[in-house]
Amino acid sequence: MDSRYEDIDELFEVRIASLIDPKVIDDRRKEYKTMYEKLKRIGDGSEGEVFKMLHQETRQIVAGRDYILRLVDGEWYPCTPKDDYQMLVMEYCELGTFMTWLTQQCAQDRTGTWRAPHEGQLRHFYIQMVKAIAFLHCGWGTYAFDHDTGRVPGHKPLLHRDIKPENILLCPAPDGTLDSLPTLKLSDFGGAWQCAVPEPPQGQSLYFFTDGYIAPEFLQPPLTRDEANEACDVFAVGATMHCAIFGHNPFKELRRGQGQRSTFTYRRRAIDHARHRGADPFSPDFAARLDDALAESPLTRRTAHQILTQLQPAHAQHMAAYERWWHAEEVPYQARLAAEEQLRRERTAGACSVEAAPAQDCMCDDAAACGAIADDAQYLRADRHAWWHERQVERHREI
């Protein structure tokens, strides 16, 4: 920090004052309008839209999120492309949300089962999530962090209040690391607030937490959003990991009649008897750290810093084991899947070309049987039809 200023608040005030100059504001508006090209919309919400954008000079892909100014309580922002909204230019996370990644990697379309990631991958994600909220809650990772007290002196915890798989973004893995270990980014701080700081009346209408990821203590009155604390974020991280392992959050939803809000019962699944992609049970250490986050009572729920302290010692050992498994087992498995998919596409393309040919008399002995094959879930419709006809042609030739 600049030694000319006594504290960081003073430094912020000086920096903001330098941006209020009308010429600076005008220059920044012109830079945004001339340098950034909107390519497509990639998301939206109650506060604005998110666009994939291109910087004309550097050709860098970024994400731009606009905020309607009437929703931010009249705060002043130095980069305002138009009078009615502000644009934030941020890093573009090309792998999408954690939920999208999980669905692509774990959902087995043919069997309808959920193939849990390897424990090494889960540890990789879990430790990143815990580090993120430890930074928010106690200033972990900053030069002022006190390891003895577990926080920055005078730091007021910042709560995210809406952690879930859809609010976690993924970027490609750093160079020199496995592609299967992407970098995690915590996003969507629209509901964030400092712990123990009363919210203004207009803030009460904003969302906070999402059904299925809100801590169990908030399922019953009279707790209010003002009473949220660090334990709520920790539970939401645990619920996110529960979703990664089992394909769903740790609650059972009871749907009510039309127009009535559903109710939720906390029914987490035990990880002790579950198996990850390495075909082995989860380690007792990892299961215990998830239990720390998913404890039903906030009094027994561990803090993010405590969980992180317990996870780190064995992290390198588990990641080395994961890398060995990846090269020995997962790479050949993915190669087989790719070959099967290529074969399926070739068969589909061949069947489509047959169907596009001029119509000929069906050579099937039983036309109804030809149609009945369509009920066989093992093949696509085009594949099944072509396969049946080929079988019948061979049969007639033998006769």
Image: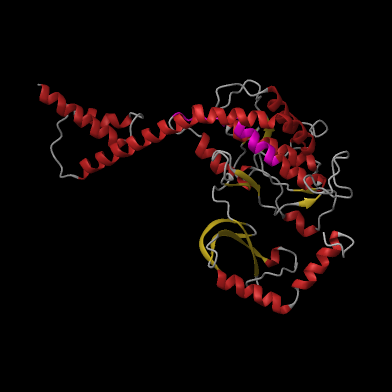
Position of residue 383 measured from the top left corner of the image (x, y, whole percent): 28, 34
Q: In which quarter of the image is residue 140?
A: top right
Q: Which residue is drawn at 18% across and 44% down?
A: 357
Position of residue 393 measured from the top left corner of the image (x, y, whole percent): 15, 29
Quadrant location of the N terminus? bottom right
Q: Is residue 174 above or below residue 61?
A: above
Q: Is residue 218 above or below residue 85?
A: above
126 or 50, which is in the foreground? 126
Q: Which residue is drawn at 50% across and 27% down?
A: 328
Q: Which residue is drawn at 14% across and 31% down?
A: 363
**Residue 115 visible:** no
Q: In this view, does 34 lie above or below 105?
A: below
Q: What stretch is highlighted in magenta?
A: 111-129
Question: Is residue 162 rendered magenta in the image?
Answer: no
Position of residue 138 measured from the top left corner of the image (x, y, whole percent): 81, 45
258 or 295, which is in the foreground? 295
**Residue 286 visible:** yes
Question: Is residue 126 rendered magenta in the image?
Answer: yes
Q: In which quarter of the image is residue 248?
A: top right
Q: Is residue 79 above or below residue 282?
A: below
63 lies left or right of 161: left
Q: Which residue lies furthest to the front in this view?
A: 176
Position of residue 219 measured from the top left corner of the image (x, y, whole percent): 74, 38
Q: Which residue lies furthest to the bottom in this view?
A: 23
Quadrant location of the C terminus? top left
Q: Residue at x 50, y 34 (%)?
A: 107
7 or 391, which is in the foreground? 7
